[in-house]
Amino acid sequence: MIHATKEIPGYAYGSKDIQLSPVSMQELEELKVTVGWTDDDPIYLRLAGEVLEDQTKQIVDHWRNGIIASIPDLARHSQTPEGDRIPAYVANSGERFEQWILDTCRRPYDQDWLNYQLEIARRHTSASKNKVDGVRSTPYVPLRDILAFIVVINETIKPYLAAKGHSAEDVAKMHLAWCKSLQLQTALWTKLYMDTAHTPSEW
Ligand code: HEM
């Protein structure tokens, strides 16, 4: 199943309120070539979706509570400027993060998907961070931290991909497809971060 079984606060995939991506479908296709995308990748991502479906909560807890929470420079992005926790913010954005794992594996990479890439980028920058949940926190997550965190996400997803007894070869193919997708998505997000005509540099 692609879609959430229950309403996720602030999750707006495919909604008419989501802006059109400034990246064209043609540019997306070109970027897929750059990342080495093959016809196998969506197949193995779908398999990864089956494997990860009932593990998304654990995975997001691992990233957020197990890693980000213990790095003050990252943890501050889910807190108030005074350093207080904002439980509803963590809970709501965490549910959206869980859904993103499944969207990465199961959604067709079409215009809606491309548009939601812009929305996710907006929610990490001053264009829209904090707005969906109406909270007071840091104005943006620096691009450098997003890019540096890719390796952490890719490394820590491995045991979850291997958790359902698939062969080492299948797990490796799921992992490679996952890594390509994450690289593709974060490359798309840089478009907004580079758009310094509208927002200050948030490097
Ligand atoms: C490759 C790295 C990353 C990925 C794939 C990622 C993915 C996501 C996704 C999918 C969401 C939910 C988007 C939605 O609302 O639908 C999200 C939200 C968020 N992420 Fe990240 N993220 C990454 C890096 C980081 C880093 C390094 C931080 C710093 C702590 C961070 C902090 C946040 C925060 C605070 C939110 C909530 C934003 C808001 O709506 O106000 N992310 N992230």
Image (spheres, rainbow, N blue to C red):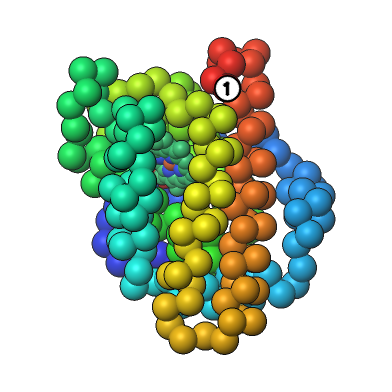
Image point (56%, 39%), residue name: 148
Residue in view at x 78 percent, y 44 percent: 27
**Callout 1, which amino acid?**
Trp
Relative to 126, 32 lies left or right: right
The residue tagged 1 is 203
- Say above or below: 125 vs 28: above
Rendered location of residue 102, percent (x, y): 46, 63
- Ligand 1's quadrant is top left
Taking the image as shown, residue 118 lies to the left or right of residue 177, namely: left
**Residue at the image point whose x is 81% and y is 51% from the top:** 34
Residue 83 at x, y = what percent? 22, 23
The residue positioned 81% from the left and 55% from the top of the image is: 33
Where does residue 162 sit, x and y in percent of width and height? 48, 76
Residue toward you, 168 or 87: 168
Q: Nearer the viewer, residue 119 or 155?
A: 155
Total count of labels: 1
